[in-house]
Each structure stands twice: as structure tokens, then as C-alpha cells.
Image (cartoon, rainbow, N blue to C red):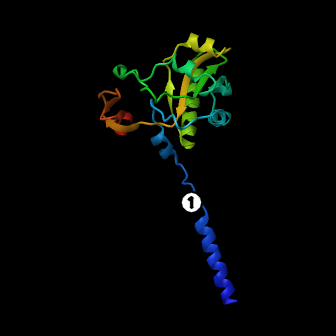
Amino acid sequence: MADNYLENKFEELRDRAKRPAPRKANTLDTLLARNRSYRGYDKKVVVGMSTLEKIVAVNTKIPSARNQQVLRFKLVTRDSGADNVLANIKMGGALPELHLPFEGTEPEAYIIVCSTEPESKLVDIDLGIAAQSMLLKAVDLGLNGLMIGAFNKSAITEAFALKYEPLLILAIGKGAETIRLTEIREGESHRYYRENDVHYVPKVALADLLL
């Protein structure tokens, strides 16, 4: 009996050692810290349509102003028109001298966010909730993203035969930059900048956010 007991315990320990380590759960603070605006991406990581669908699926769970749910989404991958998006967007407006993205780091997957209703305060509330939620989901999947508001609306509408007005474009991919937050006080510059290949993003200190 003792021999069987020891044999069973050894087998149990061997089986346990073979199991993959459990994935560490993402906390909200972890997701928020990793959810930075990337303008350069690793092209070896290809984002397909199924991944974009998982990201957009958060919109079936999040709040909506008056529950109107007016947002609609066009998914674009490397094989379905990413070059057309890239040709009609601008990135890194505060760093025009860098001409971002750098060659070889361009995003190759996008979510074009449209609205079935004219843009309004309520639509913009939904837009903010949706964009942040989708980017947090991207981070949860091990990816990164960028909200792009500077784009040629008419060209994007025509290129993808959109029947609704595009309001925002999300770039999705695996970030290939080093981004750090830096604390600032009330009245200091909010302008992001780069030093030694590190992208710094100023954030107002909590003490100055409170009234």
C-alpha cells in the first residue's frame, strides 16, 4: 500500500510539473499601464480578421449613451486594404519632424469606427467608451493600438465603400517602441516627446486632477 501511495504521489508531481504555468490575470491597472499609443509595430506579428473581431466584440458588452448603439465597424487587415488606410492617415502630430511611422514599422490592421447617426455629444460618448474598451481588449490579447483622428474621411469612405461616416480609426498590432509615462504638474506642457528612442508621455499628477 505504501509503495502504491508513493508511486501515485510521484506520478502526480510529474504531471503537475508538465502542466503549463497558469496565465497571470490582468488587472485593470495592468491593462491601463500597458495601453499606450504605439506608432511603430512589429510586422512579424500578423493581426488577422478573427483577432479584430474579438476586439470589436467588446461592443456587445459595454455601455452606450441612451443605449443607442449607433457605432459600426469596418475591419481591415494586411490582405484587405491596410495600405489604403496607411496612405490616408497621419500619426505623431506632435513630432512632425520624425515622419511617423518609421519605414518597416507601419501598422497593418485597422478598425474603422463609423456611426449610423450624425456625430453628436452622445455619439462621442459612445465613441470614447468603445475606443478605450477595444484598445484594452487588444492589450489583453497581447497587442497594442493607437487612436487615429487625423485621416482623410472622404478618401477612407471611398476606398472602403462605407455607407456611414467614419469618426475614428484604431491601428492594431504588436507595439515595437518603448513608451514611458512621466508625471507633470498643473500648467506644465502636455506635449509628448522622444529622447534616446524612448517615447515619453506626460500625465498630470493626481493631486492636480482633484478639485
User: Considering the image in quadrants, where does the C terminus appear?
Assistant: top left
Q: Position of residue 42 (x, y in %)?
A: 49, 36
**Toward the viewer: 37 or 58?**
37
Above or below for 51 versus 159: below
Instruction: Give the side of residue 56 with respect to residue 149, left or right.
Output: right
Figure quadrant of residue 20: bottom right
| Residue at image coords 33%, 34% | 197
Instruction: Give the side of residue 115 with respect to residue 106, left or right.
Output: right
How many numbered circles are shown? 1
Q: Position of residue 87 (x, y in %)?
A: 51, 17
Q: Position of residue 96 (x, y in %)?
A: 36, 19
Q: Which residue is label 1 attached to?
A: 21
Q: Is residue 211 visible?
A: no
| Residue at image coords 66%, 23% | 72
Above or below for 26 versus 63: below
**Toward the viewer: 54 or 176?**
176
User: Considering the image in quadrants, where does the N terminus appear?
Assistant: bottom right
Q: Position of residue 86 (x, y in %)?
A: 52, 21
Q: Neighbour class for label 1 at 10 Å: few (<14), some, many (≥20)?
A: few
Q: Secondary structure at mark 1?
A: loop
| Residue at image coords 56%, 43% | 140
Instruction: Give the side of residue 27 with respect to residue 118, left or right.
Output: left
Figure quadrant of residue 157: top right
Q: Amino acid at mark 1?
A: Ala
**Outermost residue, bottom side:** 1
Q: Is residue 24 visible?
A: yes
